[in-house]
Structure formats: C-alpha cells, structure tokens
Amino acid sequence: MRVPLSWLREYVDVPADATTDDVFAALVSVGFEEEEALGFEVTGPVVVGQVLSFDEEPQTNGKTIRWCQVDVGEAEPRGIVCGASNFFPGDKVVVSLPGAVLPGPFPISARKTYGHVSDGMIASARELGLGDEHNGILRLAELGLDPAPGTDAITLLGLDDVAVDVNVTPDRGYALSIRGIAREYAHATGAAFRDPAAHEWDDVQPGSGFPITVDDQNPIRGRVGASEFVARVVRGVDPSRPTPPWMIARLTLAGIRSLGILIDITNYVMLELGNPVHGYDLDTLEGGITVRRATEGETIVTLDGKERMLSVEDLLITDDSGPIGLAGVMGGGTTEMTDATRNVLIEAATFDPVSIARTARRHKLPSEASRRFERGVDPLIPFVAARRVADLMVELAGGTLDTELGGALYGEVFLEAIELPRAFVPQLIGVDYTDAEITGALETIGCEVSALDDGDGWEVIPPSWRPDLTDRWTLAEEVARIHGLDRIPSVLPTPPSGRGLTPLQKGRRRVANALAGAGYVETPSFPFATAAANTLHGSASGDADPGIRLANPLDGQAPYLRRSLVPGLLQVAHRNLSRGFTDLALFETGLVFDPEMGVAYGTAVVPPLGQRPTDETLAALDASIPPQPRRVAVLLTGSVSPKAPGRAAVAADLADVLSAVEVIGAAAGVRIDVAQGERAALHPGRTGALSVGGVEIGYVGEVLPAVSAEADLPGRVYVAEIDLDLALSLAGRPDVAASLSGFPAATQDVSLVVGDDVVAGDVAAALREGAGDLLESLRLVDDYRGHGLADGTKSLTFALRFRAEDRTLTAAEATDAKLAGVAVAAERCAATIRE
C-alpha cells in the first residue's frame, strides 16, 4: 500500500518535519513491512511560464519546432525550443529552468539545439512524472489553474509530496486504505486520529425508488454473494472538468494513473476508505440492478474490452439487458462512464470475499477492487463511501446529488464477542501485561471491552473493520503488537517433560546417522517414478501394478508415486557418474506408496475450505490413501577403496552391501538374517531376502546387468532396501551395552558338510541355537566346493568364540558347546563334520 504523506496528514497528526524513515519506523513497530519510499524525483527550479509568442521553424528532418518566448516571472523572457504543437500564445505552462532535474534523472541545462540556445524546457505531464500520457506539453488551463508566471510549479502540482510503501499481509485488508494506515500510525505514535468514516447515519442514507435485488441461487459455502448494496445518483456531472492537481499527484504516488475526473474520484475514495466504488452511466442502464450468479454459457465484455466466458460461480451485476459487471472485480463496457456521461449511478457494496477471490483468479483479472474485497472490507463503510463519492462529484465535477432517487440493501452486521481470560495474554506472550495495558491496547484498535461477570477476564467485541480478530489468540497478538514486539523476551521455552522425538523418529535418526558415519552419502530424491520403474522394482516378481498415478504430475514422463527407493538411487548414481564421480556409496530414507491389490484409492469428494471436515469425512480421506511405509535403501558401485601407491583399488562387492545391512540392523536394534532370495531386478544367485525373527523386511543383492545398462551405469551395482518402520517395530526393547568380561575367550573352528542347496544362514542359526549362551560370536569364514567332497555337497567353515561371564572356560567346555551346536545342525540340515 502506497501512502502519500500529505494524504496521511489529513487524518492523523504526522509532524511537519517527519521524514519517510520516521513514518516507516512507526509503521514497522506495529507489524508492517517496509518496502520503499516514493517521490516524483523533481527538483527545482521548475516554475510556471506564460508563452508570449513563438515562431514555427520547419527542419530538414521533417520536424517543425517552435522557438518560443516564455515569461517565467523574470525581467526578460526566456527563449526555449519546443517540439510540441498543442499550446498557444498566452497559455500557462510548466517550465524546467537550467539546474532542474526531472525524473529519470534528466538534468536540464541551457543548450544549443536547432540553431538556438534553449534556456530551459517546457515540460509534459509524463516528463514531470504525473502520468503516462505524452500527447504534448502540460497546459495548466486544462487543470483549471491560472497562476502567475514564476510561481513554483513543484508546490502548485504537488510534486513535493512523497509516499511510503508498506507491505500489507492478507489478514489485514483494512490497511489497504489511507484510513487504515492512519489509524495504525496513531496506534504506533499516539498521534490524534480523525476517522474519515465518522458520519452521522442519517447523512449517508441514500434515497429510494431505484430497484436493487440480490438473487443468489448458487451461494458459495452457503454465503450470499452480496450482503450490502448502496446506490446513489448524481445528476448533471461534467466529465470534461479537469482532475485537480493534488488529486492527480496523490493517485500517481499511490500507483494509479489519472483517467478522468469521474473515474479518478471513485479510485480516490477506494484508496481513502478501503471500500471499492463503481460508477455507471445511469442513462445506459435498463431497469434496476440485480446481483446474481452467472448462468452456463453467459458472457460479458469487461472494461478492458475482452469478452469473458463466465462460470456459474461468478457473481454478476446485471440490469434488464444482462450482465453489466463482474461484481467486485471489474465493470462492464456497456455501462461505463465516458465523456458523454451526464448522470451517474454510484455503487458501493459488501461482497463475499471467497466469491470475489475465485472470480479474479478464474479470469486472471486481479484488480485494486478485488484485492480489497477478497481480504474483507468494513461492512459499515459502503454507505459512507457512496456519499463521499457523491460529494466529490458535486464539488469537482459540477453535479447535483439526487436525494430522492437511490436504493440500498441493508445487511445485518453481527460481531461475535470473544471471551478473553485475564491470565491468557501474559501466559501466551510471556510478558507481564497489566489489566490496563491489555484493555487499553484492545480499545485502541477499536474493540469494545467489558468485564466478565466473574471478574476473571473480559468480553471483547472486535471492530467491524477487523474480520481477522476471531479468537483470544488473535487478540493476544494485537496486545503484543500495540505494546511493542520488542518487549517479548528472547528466551527459548522449556519443553514439558515427556516430550521430544518418538521412538520411531529416534530410530530413523540412528539409522541415517549410522549410514553417514559408515561413509554413505544421503541423497533425497523426488517421490515420482515411471510405470516401468514401479512395475520392475515394486515387487519381487516384477509384474506389480504401477501404483498410484497423479492427476496432475510435475513430470509427464514420471506420473506415478514411487513404490521403491531404488529407481531414485539409480538416477542419482547416473547423474553423478555423468559428472565424473565413479565411486559411489549412496543411501536414502523416505516414504514409498504401496497400494494393495484390488483396492481403489482416491476420493471424488473434496471437503470445502474454511471449515473443519467431520470425523467421517476424515476417516474416508484416510481410507483413500494407500499405505506409505518408510524405507531405507543403499546403493554401492565402483570402488570402496581407491587405488593408492602400493595398493590396488578394491571394487565394491556383495559383502560390502551386506555390511551396510549390518550397520542398519545395529542402528535399528535388530539382528537381520540373510537368506537366498529372488527379485526381478536383481541378479539370480546374488540376491538375498532380509528378515528379522522370521518376518521379511527387505532385500539385498546385485542389480541385473540389463537394469544397470538401462540406467547407464557401467560395472556392478549393489543395492539393499529395507522397510525401516517395520524393522524398528520389531526391535522390541532397546539393546543395552554389556559390560566387558575379564575372562578370556575360547576359540574353535568347525567345518560342516551339507548339501549345496542348504542355506548357510540356516546352518549358522542351528549352530547358534545349539551352542547356547556360551557362544559369543559366530562367523562364516569359508565356503568350499570341489575336490575331496561328494558331488552336490559343500563345506561351510565357521569361526566360533566362546566366553563365560564368571569363569575361564576349559577347552572341554568349549568343545561340548560346539558339538551341541553341530548336533542341532545335523538334525535340521543333515550336516556332518568334515573329516
């Protein structure tokens, strides 16, 4: 919102010597954001001149210039070259004398041109910064001015005014007006505020007899599109009258160009009071006005000359001929005010913010009016705004107010009281405000405050211009704002006991930190995938349904929500390899979307905004969402140990990705078992199924060469993916680090011959179970197949370590524990000790 200081001073006592920085500081202290200071950037000498005479001189380039003699209030006239031809001898004009600077900056000096020394410049409105028109020089008679030559034109035209531009947040629509900013300046400084809307109710009542009807058959969210509508009539206006220079200057500084006296007045009042006002040429109206929704296929030509196809949600202003305006957004071309207008119908209304916002966005037609309506205007101001426009048209456009003809739709303005407990504001803000400070701040912003019957708080009725004050929390914010945000201590709150991260959140962090500590780099990726990637990686068989397709995907080539983290890691690996990074150890934790077969997801019912859905609606929305487990995945390719002097590079292999699985299991607090498995995207024989206590939680293995090649990844690629939430849920009680034993360990090896189709993990599990509590660790150290063994068998060698907590084990005790494990392995896996 751009606020000219001369305009602001009309309604609040801003010191005469106050700078834009002073005004900014005051407004920032009550919650506004400083943008920039604005001015006309004109410095003198710029004076009024009177053209005494001129000679027209054709030039060789086809132009004709005028060599003018101009009286600027000095003893002798000045000779000035001018290329314009829209002035005559005797005209009063604006002359920029040498030493002046015009916007640009454009310094003025005496210079030789077209065979003369031009001792200044006769300026146009555009060159002075008063508008975009450049149809010739500015003739002061067209502005209704007849000053003496030599008069300071900067002061005469209001070019010495400046404005401050502040950012207004969407919840403070009342501040999109001089009235609102003046009130806030008064709050910040204590300066006296004079409300421009302070009129007696009888003074702002319109006449009667003009029919106004609201027929809203399709209200949005049950709210009628127009709750108030005021119409006043001014007759005998003269649209050719000039807009006063002070009004042009103020509108220009506020960012609105002058379009003629009638339109300028409506824009001026909108900026002044915050209520948009529209004027119609009364003689072009057919019958009365009806406010209704558009019908299917209806169109309107708006003031910008464009024909617009309307939606049944669009709120219209209509007469007997059809639509004559998009309510609260833009008027129609058939009833606009023109140079031929003599009688004006003034409209001021209160429209539903949601209706206006949707219409403005639907038609890509943001306007100063819609900007205010969609934030909510003061429902008590339309009558004042209509009267203010009428008075200015009488004063500046020569009209006569018709006190008999007019009309109004009166809406009930109900302001619900808010109960504010006495201790609420100090407890919430953390400042010991007194009762007087709390009530004083609320009364300052316009609230009505009365004590509750029990004396332990207040009942607060917000002012009509503050629709954002809806509960005790917003009232507390106002108290803090008025008394200064600098009073709020910068102290971090102490969290109540029992709060913090949940066990699942802590587990996720442990896993991520453990992988990072093991040398893996976390690479989050977008949760979108192609149908082929979801089908291949979404299930073990590789023929799963592609999953959930987005209705409006960011990337048309990847319209599905991912079912696996692996495709994203493959893309990241390809991107890094293309940039020369060949040795990669990557991981990601994130959600996947795993719909159940045969279940239809999604909902056709979208709950309305602005109100809390019912429990049934929320349950239906939850049921429409597929399961979203959180997983962790790792990818290895290239070398795990780079080449160095005296040492060859060590390529990543399956053992390295299995080590990553062990890291995840240790951080999650579970022991992950690995068994032979199959997966469509992984290499047969080099794929493992991961489980915890018999519950499968993921997979590990080498990516198929064909899949790696399709991802443009040379060499071998190893991956693992684990359902992290499931693994953490299986962890049970957290592991507690055992104390170190002071007794020595007893180590033994055992080689067992089993069938080559027996899984080594099953043999290890049998040994572990049979050996009992004395077994401290078990590790597979060799898998031998060949000479000395029968066909179809293999030899598995395990390194066993035994230890007792209370004594030194004997060799016999260690041997007995080992043989007990061998007995279980023999029973379950037909294992025999290798001779």
Image (tube, helix red, strand yellow):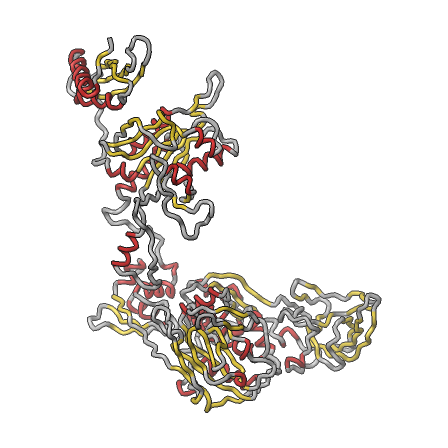
Q: Is residue 547 left or right of residue 796?
A: right
Q: Evaluate whether residue 649 shows in this view.
A: yes
Q: Which quarter of the figure has residue 809?
A: top left
| Count of number-bearing discs | 0
- Residue 562, above or below 791: below
Q: Is residue 26 left or right of residue 220?
A: right
Percent x, y of residue 120:
74, 70
- Residue 146, above or below 582: below
Q: Is residue 419 left or right of residue 559?
A: left
Nearest the camera: 112 or 704?
704
Q: Which quarter of the figure has residue 808?
A: top left
Percent x, y of residue 554:
45, 49
Nearest the camera: 816 or 368?
816
Percent x, y of residue 180:
44, 71
Q: Residue at x 81, y 68 (%)?
A: 62
- Residue 142, above or below 441: below
Q: Evaluate whether residue 274 shows in this view.
A: no
Q: Which quarter of the figure has residue 506?
A: top left
Q: Residue at x 40, y 32 (%)?
A: 635
Quadrant, the C terminus:
top left
- Residue 270, above or below 29: below
Q: Residue at x 39, y 48 (%)?
A: 549
Nearest the camera: 731 or 168?
731
* Name of the residue lying farthest toward the bottom: 404
Percent x, y of residue 480:
35, 63
